[in-house]
Amino acid sequence: MDFSIRHLGAAALMLSTAAVSANAADMPTKAYVPAPAVAQVYNWTGLYVGVNGGYGWGSQDPLTLVSNRFDRTSFNISGGMFGGTMGAQIQQGIVVLGVEGDLDWANIKGNGVSTPTIAGVPQAITLNIASKISAVGTARLRAGVAMNNWLFYATGGAAFVKSSADGTSIAGSACGTAGVLTNCSASAWRPGLAVGLGAEWAFTQNWSAKLEYLYIATVGGGANTDHLNTVRTGNSSMRTGIDEFV
């Protein structure tokens, strides 16, 4: 009797297991869904160093370098420039804030003939005078909007320009004449302000290229101001990061 019951129980268990297996085999198989792709967004936070080069043009008063007695005059100047850049910035959302400094060798120059005046009265000397900017440095803040690996920014800060004048008397008194013009050549660093706009493109995680315009106004003698426009391209190596999001 016990033997028959045990055999009946085993048979029932086998039938139940077979039924469950058959039902499982009839259930549809869920399709494999791959994990969503992870996009990469460029992060502009980091330190950077680089090089830049470009062209400058504007106007300069070289006479204020040799004497602050004369009325305002102006020569057109133009030429190339090349130098280095370094900076640091931080990104929060799409806003990027930073500081940047650069120093460029320059060959921005012009020349002309000038008869200095004082209160409109011509002086007893006429000069053939060469005017030149040989170096340009700036220390600026940058504020921009990031669009992934593109950055569009405004910038502004201090500027320092190395200006020189070299004159030769071609009429009237000679250079060095007391009471007229004691010195016809001089050079000095002139302070000023720089403002501008730029766009920068990160073409790899650690390298970027930019195009930038700066307007620089420097202070000379009296109320005189020199004006310099620069357009530069640059290439920078950055220590930065990449954020990941779904």
Image (cartoon, grey):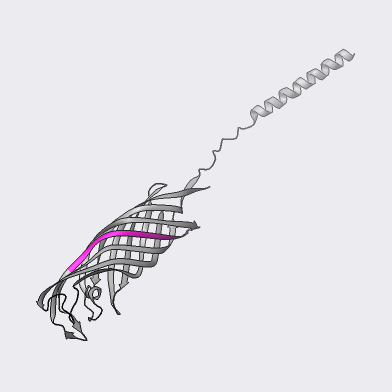
Q: Quadrant of the N terminus?
A: top right
190 displayed left or right of 90: left
Count of numbered labels shown in the rendering: 0
Compared with residue 68, is residue 91 higher up or lower down, i.e. above or below?
above
Q: Nearer the viewer, residue 95 or 40?
A: 95
**Residue for point 19% across, 86% down:** 120
Residue drawn at x 17%, y 80% as measured from the top left: 178
Which residue lies most toward the right here?
Answer: 1
Please state which of residues 203 and 59 is positioned toward the viewer in this rendering. 59
Residue 130 in percent (x, y) is at 17, 68
Quarter of the image for residue 101 reads bottom left
- Say which quarter of the image contains residue 151: bottom left
- Residue 233 point in image, percent of width and height: 31, 56
Location of residue 45 in the rendering, given as x and y in whole percent from the top left corner: 47, 54
User: Relative to 5, is 181 above or below?
Assistant: below
Q: Is residue 223 magenta?
A: no
Q: Residue furthest left?
A: 171
Residue reaching furthest to the front: 178
Question: Would residue 12 appear left or right of 40 to someone viewing this image?
Answer: right
Query: Which region shows up in magenta?
Result: 95-110
Left or right for 223, reference 128: right
Secondary structure of the magenta portion, mostly? strand
Q: Position of residue 99 (x, y in %)?
A: 43, 61
Q: Residue at 38% of width from left, 67% of height from top? A: 158
Q: Is 188 or 195 nearer to us in this picture?
A: 188
Give 53 or 178, whichever is nearer the viewer.
Answer: 178
